Image: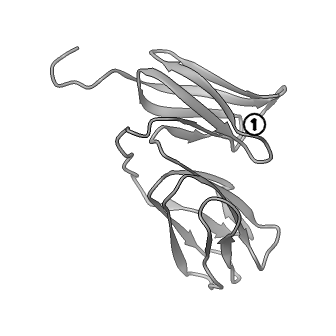
């Protein structure tokens, strides 16, 4: 190791599956509560557009403030009353933005009380090492220091999976729901 350099790290790429099917919108995260907080490069947004929340699944680190802009052509009222962060943004029109600080770990199921088909999930984790799988089930968690981690994976409608992974050069992960 060269003086002044931190520990080696790797990008951990992988795939999420259920049986033989690739799973999109799965959240994968590694326990690392003592790790330094990730600095977001841009604002974190859960948009309301075309009577949908975009993205459908969002993962953020504890302490992140999420913007809820109404970029639709109708009023919305985003809320979460069940688990995780409880909030009710009230009725608000096109062009308006509300902000919600997600200050504790857990899953928030987000709905609109005017449009019952609208639903999204915000998973709040206490680690900077997380990702959401894309439409092909692929994910990448960036700059994870080498070591052994407990990992967790969640997807809508399924139980959380827990296991361990050893992060080193060239490591990949396969997350499989039965």
Up/down of 150 relative to 170, above or below: below
Secondary structure type for disc 1: loop
**Residue that label 1 marks:** 23
Instruction: State the residue at coordinates (43%, 20%).
Output: 147
Instruction: State the residue at coordinates (62%, 84%).
Output: 92
Q: Pinpoint residue 15: horizontal percent, then vertical percent.
A: 67, 28
Q: Pinpoint residue 156: horizontal percent, then vertical percent.
A: 76, 48
Residue placed most toward the observer, 82 or 175: 82
Q: Pinpoint residue 159: horizontal percent, then vertical percent.
A: 76, 40
Q: Tell me if 26 is positioned left or right of 62 in this view.
A: right
Task: Tell me the quarter of the picture where residue 81 sits.
Answer: bottom right
Q: Tell me if 113 is positioned left or right of 71 in this view.
A: right
Task: Tell me the quarter of the picture where residue 95 sits.
Answer: bottom right
Q: Pinpoint residue 5: horizontal percent, then vertical percent.
A: 22, 24
Residue placed most toward the observer, 129 or 126: 126
Instruction: State the residue at coordinates (60%, 78%).
Output: 89
Up/down of 102 relative to 78, above or below: above
Q: Quadrant of the C terminus?
A: top right
């Amino acid at each position: 190791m060269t003086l002044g350099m931190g520990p080696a790290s790797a990008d951990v790429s992988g795939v999420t599956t259920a049986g033989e099917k690739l799973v999109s919108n799965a959240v994968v995260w590694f326990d690392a509560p003592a790790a330094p907080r990730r600095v977001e490069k841009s604002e974190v947004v859960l948009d309301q557009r075309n009577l949908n929340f975009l993205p459908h699944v969002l993962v953020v680190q504890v302490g992140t403030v999420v913007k809820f802009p109404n970029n639709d052509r109708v009023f919305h009222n985003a809320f979460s009353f069940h688990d995780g962060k409880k909030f009710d943004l009230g009725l608000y029109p096109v062009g308006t933005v509300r902000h919600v600080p997600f200050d504790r770990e857990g899953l928030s199921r987000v709905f609109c009380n005017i449009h019952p088909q609208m639903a999204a999930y915000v998973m709040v984790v206490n680690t900077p090492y997380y990702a959401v799988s894309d439409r092909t089930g692929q994910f990448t968690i960036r700059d994870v220091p080498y070591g052994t981690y407990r990992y967790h994976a969640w997807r809508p409608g399924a139980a959380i999976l827990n296991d361990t992974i050893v992060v080193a050069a060239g490591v990949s992960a396969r997350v499989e729901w039965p």
